[in-house]
Amino acid sequence: MIPNVVRGERMSGLMMYLVGPGKTNEHTEPHLIAGDPALLAWHDDAELDREAALGIARHLERPRSVYGVNVNGGHVWHCSLSIAAEEGLLTDEKWQSIANDFIQAMGFDEHEGTKAPCRWVAVRHGVSKKGNDHIHLAVNLVREDGTKASIHNDFRRSQSAARALEVKYGLEQLESVKAERATRGYDPAERESVARRRARAKYERQHTKEGALPASWENLTKAEKAAHVAAELSETQPRHDLALKVRAAAAASESEAEFVRRLRRSGCILRPRFAENRTDVITGYSVAERPHYGESPVWYGGLHLGRDLSLPRLRGNWPDTPGGATEAAAEWNAAMRGRRVVRAGREAQEISPEAWEQQTTQLGELIDRLNAVDVNDRDTWATVARQAAGALAAWSNATEDTPGDLAAASEALSRSAQTFRRTVTPQKAGTTALSGTAMLLASAMHSGQGAVAQAAMIRQLLRVTQAVHSAAVAGQQVRQAKLLAEDTRARLVRVRDAMPKPGHPAGQAPGPSTLTDRREPALEPQAQAMLDRLRAGQGKPAAPGSPVPNTLEPSKERHTTRPDATRGPER
């Protein structure tokens, strides 16, 4: 179950959206499934219309308007609860129980009689565009007595509440929490913002070349702008391409300075973040694709690209020496000022054919050693996945004009590497052979033994992928194991089959494993406490609430207009 929390000021605007057609007409039969007792006494589960939505909004807004309370950041607390499309549709009754428990877990109820409750409502309007069943909860953060509900750490609390509800109602448990990893998704607003900037720059650039004087972008109709933006939305988004290039450069480099040079060779522009009042101490970085004429660069921080791509994480792959830090600072400064590299390194050297044969042998020896690694050693396997993803990313950058099967396989493997905390270094894990593989694959187009050497390498990488898949199965990472066994392996097999077979072809990797063990995982303390509280009240009948709205009296002190002598210029 995925909670998505946002806040705002307009309850009527939110309710109108929930009962409306949606952004792409995906809303069907909007109706109430839960809410405070007074609200449910006036509205049943019939389909909601505009008049009903405004009436519900007025009911929810009443405490704030009567007491005149302002909440920093907005008093409208909106959260959607969504389940995986594979779980199908839940009944209204089950969603009602989930909504009531979620409100209780978040502390918006009367808290066993110790607080005045918040007014709230839960609306259901069909599945999302991707087929996910979900509901929306709207809460007024001003309680019935005019006090404010606590929203401290509400994002994390909502995640803990969702984990508890998954266990209580037998829903699919969020895999990334069990595996202690997470990947950043692509927000629709981010995609649309980038597409709009690209569409505008491309439109102006195209008509400038034609020498005509057409209507400016501001004078285009809404439909014309939407058509240009839709064309850009279908193309690859820059964050995916940048993550691929950064991961490839990091895996192929043996120092931070080489990492900077490789990124610049791949067409990226860099912007280091310096320590305060220093130019020789770099604490982070931002990267962007080199923009076309008329466009402005879209910058992304390393952590925004992936948890394993922040500068502190990347530095764990390279030796920490004073000379290396000085060399890296010089390259960062040159990159920021658009100057030539200070001193070229391995990235500009020719790779001998013997290096390919030697590296293939070392990679085979590494895979044999991986068979002895405990499948529950999560840190080591995350390091293996990170380096294997980097090798495939380097290969994709060198051989694929547009991101294809190699890029997709790299992205899938990288999900196993984006852990909440740092993992062991390649030196400690004994997996430096994968770094050498990435270095060779980064030069696949202009050195080596051609496609035959690459065909031998792809067979070894298939074996690495199978090993990571086995570790995912052992760790009960069902979705990740399925992705590696079906989609990722199929992509690598397609690449392998398109290459000439070496003299001694490797055997096929085993097929996907099935997993039926659905043991209840250990929850974090906050989620476990919420689950215990929800289970404790499971057998108790719900306290009957009054169907009559409370009589609210405005506070005279809150509406006084007399200047406060203790504040402002009157003090």
Image (cartoon, rainbow, N blue to C red):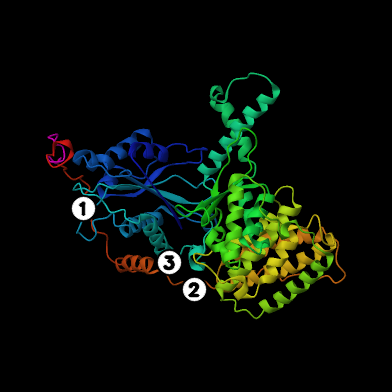
Judge by depth and name the residue closer to the eye, 571 or 519: 571
Label 2: which secondary element: loop
Q: Which residues are magenta?
A: 554-563
Binning the other alpha carbons within 10 Å of mark 1 as few (below 14), some (14 to 19) or many (20 upward) gives some
Label 1: which secondary element: loop
488, above or below 141, in the image: below
Label 3: which secondary element: helix
Q: Position of residue 316 (x, y in %)?
A: 57, 66
Q: Which residue is mark 2?
A: 519
Q: Position of residue 132 (x, y in %)?
A: 51, 51
Q: Amino acid at mark 1?
A: Ala
Q: Which residue is mark 3?
A: 167
Q: Position of residue 250 (x, y in %)?
A: 63, 60
Judge by depth and name the residue closer to the eye, 43 or 197: 197
Residue 484 got which mark?
Answer: none
Q: CA distance from mark 2 to mark 3?
A: 10 Å
Name which residue lies at 54% across and 59% down: 311
Q: Which residue is mark 1?
A: 116
